[in-house]
Amino acid sequence: MSWTSISWVIPKKIKQFGIERLFQFSDLKNEWDAILAKTAGDKFKNKSKPINLKNEVLVVDCLNSVWANELRLREIRILEEIKNKNSQLKINKISFIS
């Protein structure tokens, strides 16, 4: 019987079951306020949160329509920062909802 290191098996199983993207999305959610602070300023912290990622579209729930509109105006900068932080996560558009 041959032993296999768990540090080798777990990453392979994560990819096999397709949950790697879930971990990447979780990282994005944790970094969201830092991304907004860098791209739009500190006043944007705690005003929105990513809730879903489907078909390369990130859905972000905003406090109200005013914050959604403000973030919509900064979408390109936010997308660039997301790509800088996590180049493996494919996001081409952000849908800001309230």
Image (cartoon, helix red, strand yellow):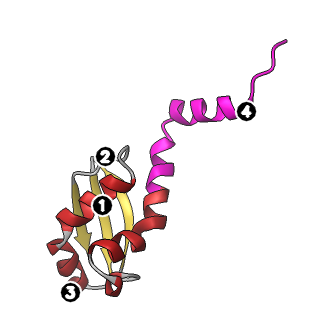
Q: Percent position (x, y) of residue 20?
A: 49, 42
Q: Is residue 30 left or right of residue 89?
A: right
The amino acid beneath tag 3 is Val
Looking at the rendered structure, the kind of residue marked 4 is Ile
User: Up-down: is 15 above or below 71?
Assistant: above
Q: Indicate the quadrant containing the N terminus: top left, top right, bottom left or bottom right.
A: top right
Q: CA distance from mark 1 to mark 3?
A: 22 Å
Name the secondary structure under disc 4.
helix
Q: Viewed as shown, does residue 60 lie left or right of 29? A: left
For the residues carrying marks 1 and 2, which lies nearer the camera in this image? 1
Which residue carries the number 1 mark? 81
Q: Based on the picture, tell me whether residue 9 belongs to the magenta stretch.
A: yes
The residue at the far left in this view is 73
- Mark 1 is surrounded, within 10 Å at the Cα level, by few (under 14), some (14 to 19) or many (20 or more) other residues, namely some
Above or below, 26 relative to 74: above
| Residue at 39%, 65% in the rendered image | 51
- Mark number displayed over residue 66: 3
Can you identify the residue that label 4 sits on?
A: 6
Q: Are marks 4 and 3 in contact (CB under 8 Å)?
A: no
On the image, numbered disc 2 is attached to which residue? 90
Residue under the image location 33 percent in, 58 percent down: 82
Which of discs 4 and 3 lies nearer the camera? The answer is: 4
Q: Secondary structure at mark 2?
A: loop
Q: Quadrant of the C terminus?
A: bottom left
Marks 1/2: CA distance?
Answer: 13 Å
Assess disc 3: are there few (<14), some (14-19) or many (≥20) residues with their C-alpha within 10 Å of its C-alpha: few
In the image, residue 33 lies at what x, y percent? 41, 74
Magenta region, residue range: 1-25
Q: CA distance from mark 4 to mark 3?
A: 48 Å
Q: How many marks?
A: 4
